Image (cartoon, rainbow, N blue to C red):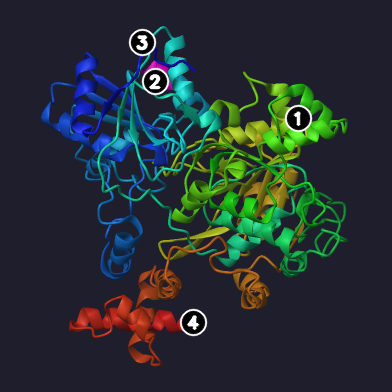
Amino acid sequence: MTESAREPLYFQSLDEAVELLYRRIDGPLQVGAPLGLGKPHRLLNALYARAEREPSRRLHLYTALSLDPPGAGKGLEARFLKPFAQRHFGDDYPRLAYVQALKRNALPAHMEVEEFYLQSGALLNSQAAQSRYASLNYTHVARALADRGVNAVVQKVAADPSGSGRLSLSCNTDLTFDAVDAIVARGLPRPLLIAEVDPLLPWLDGSAAVEASFFDAVVSPPGPHPKLFGLPRQPVSDADYAIGFHASTLVRDGGTLQIGIGTLADALCHALVLRHTDNAAYWRVLRALGYDQSGESSSVGIPALGGTASGRVDLSSTRNAMAPVAPLLPFSVGLFGCSEMLNEGFRRLVEVGVIKRKVVDDLDFMRRLHEGRADAADLERLEREGEYLQGGFYLGSQDFYDWLRDMPEDRRRGISMRRISEVNELYGGNETLERLQRHDARFFNSCMMATALGAAVSDTLDDGRVVSGVGGQYNFVAMAHALPDARSVLMLRATRDSGGETRSNVVWNYAQATIPRHLRDVYVTEYGIADLRGKTDEDCIQAMVAVAAAGHQFPLLDSAMRHGKLPRATYRLSDRNDPQRLRDALAPLRAQGALPDYPLGSDFTAVEQRLVKALAWLKANTAGSGAKARTVFKALFSSGAADAEAMQRMGLAQPSGFGERIEARLVALALRETA
């Protein structure tokens, strides 16, 4: 990395830092900012305020994942969210001014915001955000920033608590180094780099740390310092747990792990934790899902897919297409974590000893280790210098940040924050070394929908509106095909509720695709695993139908037969692919505590946890006009003990007026139904 020859300028005033930016740069301000946590909210808001006052200077902001706390909402949502948001984020959390303008479709004409990844679903109705979205692989972003001529980069950093004066990019080493190098390599001037010091940001050393002279200016605004953005941890549903436990059977001891974010990833992490810490309980869950102790499904004796000699094809196996199963014992060697994003799940996996396999950036050393030739000195070096977790950025809860901040130094050294070009790719760097480090890799990500032919829909709706973005998903799918013993596993719920209807997430086709079908590999729903790698279209369709939900399988089969992709035959389907059967199968395990609502901890109080379940039930049961009428009628004419604490928390203990009395009745009903 290139560093400035002179000491940076130091400021305490955000406005003075913005003034420097305006003074040093001629013409339009082409400003890059990290995604997620590393975005310097207060500095960007000061820049936005200055830009509003000076419309003669154009401002282009290039960034991603502009985190915004949930809005107040309306009705019951507002009653729940407002007190929670005040406690969780703090009243002084600096909402990004440009995000508020984007949501109102009120961004000034001389400003432009271009993002390559959006906060999921947050900007579906923002014309400016949708039109200026850039669909990019994560590893191509640095090149794109050079193409756009970025002339400034602003970033939140941590200061070395030892007082050395060094700074850590901490949560976002992903793009800054790559972008600066790409811009300079293009023959453009090195961008002006301004750091905003946040004393709450955990200090991470190693490849995340730089001399202060890496930056042109360092601003340390006075307190009070707002909380770091904490992602509220959500409850894990039965479908999520089934997906996570199915997926966990694919993980091999001694391998490499990448995971995404959300409740599917939380469920997978809990499954791996249980597999390691309470293997008997882990197997109780697997047996409930149809596995026998060998790791296969209870229907393993059923004829394989694709056989049509008798005119009858069996699609009832939980493990259709015989996807490979790892030995499902506790972890002895452990896993090496290598993921663009480090999050809550990795914290738990490290704590219980699942993530513990270490690597060293030394090719000869890794060859000796891989071939079993490492001597005592090698093993001592591995313990001293080895890294068990590598990532490009991190984002999680306040507990996660505390874990990083308070970790003993000898443990913290095993976490390495790196360039995204190092984490998300094999090519252009130390490919031979990385192949040795990343053996038996399993790359787990989520998607919204999948086609019966194996394409994945992860970021964009049929009408072209972007929900989130490609991010690094394509990178990891491609890497799974490039590594000889790796697999890409895309997880999705079999159905979704939309407009009062239950719709299948396994579809015949879709206008948008994130992962093309020629890169199809493994899909997991709550009803099983579909191994599509190298399979024919006929086999892929049968495998995907087998993991679709009951009631949605025959339309897929019919489409396939009508289009000549499947032979006309009788297809036997599983009787397990039903949400009620799944709930019944997992209910005893819920009661035993093997499947907690919040496996990685919760940001909600006990009463809020009850309300989260109740409000989710209420939302599901008032989605359509008919369902809403039935639920309101039931609420008006049912009785039972009220959850006084929950009603008090919602401000409905003493409702006044007809509207509040209806709301109180609905909440009381929902609490009873989910008790």
Which residue lies under the disc numbered 2?
Answer: 213
Which residue lies under the disc numbered 1?
Answer: 436
Q: Find the distance from the CA under tag 2 to the CA under tag 3.
A: 17 Å
| Tag 1: amino acid | Leu
Question: Main SS of the magenta segment?
Answer: helix
The local crowd at label 3, few if under 14, some if 14 to 19, many if 20 or more residues have their Cα within 10 Å, is: few
Residue 364 is at least partly visible in this image? yes
Indicate which disc, 2 or 3, sits on the residue closer to the N terminus.
3
Which element type, helix, strand or loop, lies under badge 3? loop
The local crowd at label 2, few if under 14, some if 14 to 19, many if 20 or more residues have their Cα within 10 Å, is: many
Residue lying at the far left of the rendered structure: 53
Rendered image: mark on residue 675: 4
Q: In this view, does 638 lie above or below 267?
A: below
Q: Which of 453 and 238 is in front in this view?
A: 238
| Tag 3: amino acid | Pro
Q: Where is residue 442 in the image (x, y as percent from the top left)?
A: 69, 42
Q: Find the distance from the CA under tag 1 to the CA under tag 2.
A: 35 Å
* Magenta-colored span: 144-148
